[in-house]
């Protein structure tokens, strides 16, 4: 089946630094990738939708300059959390759209100290 | 307005019994898709079952079935013969618009934490 590999699975970074999260589609071409954020025991909140070769579409309230999304190829989409702060600590998960549904990465647990 | 509503923050069920997780939705689209996912403590999203708005039959996948009541806009998940490994968070989600190449985004409900007791 279609697999999205997400790395890293967890990361701890210092406040003020940037962190990059990668999602790679291993056996298919991901035209559209969705990035979600999830706080403990809460729902997945869509942050942005990225389409290969074009600028990402951000949801209302999501800071574009803070959460940089790049989808430069059909197999790689990245989310960079810039100047991270403790309140950015969360679980981030990507999802690729397929003809018949969606496939999710395994998620990245980000802790900013 | 909330598009997907799961009103049960937590549910408990005895092993081997059946449990129903509620989900209601709101959309003006005629074509949409409803999904259920399981999220164990590891965080991965496990696809369980899908129901298209035009599907006349309720979807079933092994021990999972979806009780689709279109007029009431509800899509409840029924898990039969619960197992200890079913303990997890369960999400109902909706894609508005047709599937295939439309690549519409998924909107998730608040989730229900299911605990299966031995």
Image: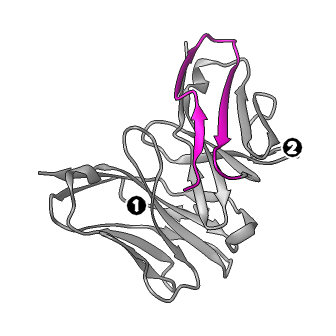
Report the residue at 70% width, 49% height from top: A33
Q: Please give the range of residues in magenta.
A: A1-28
User: Residue A5: within the magenta?
Assistant: yes
Q: Mark 1 lies on which chain?
A: B
Q: Which of A53 and B33 is in front in this view?
A: A53
Q: In the displayed structure, would residue B59 be above or below residue B79?
A: below
Residue B30 in percent (x, y) is at 67, 82
Magenta-drawn stretch contains A103: no
Residue on which disc 1 sits: B7
Q: Which chain does tag 2 point to?
A: A
Q: Nearer the viewer, residue B96 or B24?
A: B96
| Residue wearing tag 2 | A55
Residue A73 appears left or right of B39 = right
Could you say whether the residue bearing mark 2 is in a helix, strand or loop?
loop
Q: How is the image coloured?
A: one colour
Q: Furthest-front residue in view?
A: A27
Q: Is residue B95 left or right of residue B9?
A: right
Residue drawn at (53%, 37%) of the image = A107
Write the residue at 77% across / 47% down: A74
**Do callouts 2 and 1 point to residues on the same chain?**
no
Q: Based on the displayed image, in which of its 4 quarters is residue A105 positioned?
A: top right
Secondary structure state at the residue bearing disc 1: loop
Is A14 located above or below residue B38 in the figure?
above
Q: Residue furthest right?
A: A54
């Amino acid at each position: 089946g279609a697999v999205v590999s997400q790395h890293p699975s967890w990361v701890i970074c210092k406040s003020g630094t940037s962190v990059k999260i990668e999602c790679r589609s291993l056996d298919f071409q991901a035209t559209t990738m969705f990035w979600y954020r999830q706080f403990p025991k809460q729902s997945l909140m869509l942050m942005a939708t990225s389409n290969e070769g074009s600028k990402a579409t951000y949801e209302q309230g999501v800071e574009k300059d803070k959460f940089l999304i790049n989808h430069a190829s059909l197999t790689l989409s990245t989310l960079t959390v810039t100047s991270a702060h403790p309140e950015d600590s969360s679980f981030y998960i990507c999802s690729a759209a397929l003809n018949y549904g969606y496939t999710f990465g395994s998620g990245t647990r980000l802790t900013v100290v | 307005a909330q598009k997907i509503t799961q009103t049960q923050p937590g549910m408990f069920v005895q092993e081997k019994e059946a449990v129903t997780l509620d989900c209601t939705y709101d959309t003006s689209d005629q074509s949409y898709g409803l999904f259920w996912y399981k999220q164990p403590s590891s965080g991965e999203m496990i696809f369980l079952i899908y129901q298209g708005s035009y599907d006349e039959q309720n979807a079933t996948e092994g021990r999972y079935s979806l009780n689709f009541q279109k007029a009431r806009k509800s899509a409840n998940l029924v898990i039969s013969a619960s197992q200890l490994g079913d303990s997890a968070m369960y999400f109902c989600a909706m894609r508005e618009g047709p599937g295939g190449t439309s690549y519409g985004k998924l909107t998730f409900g608040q989730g229900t934490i299911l605990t299966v007791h031995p």
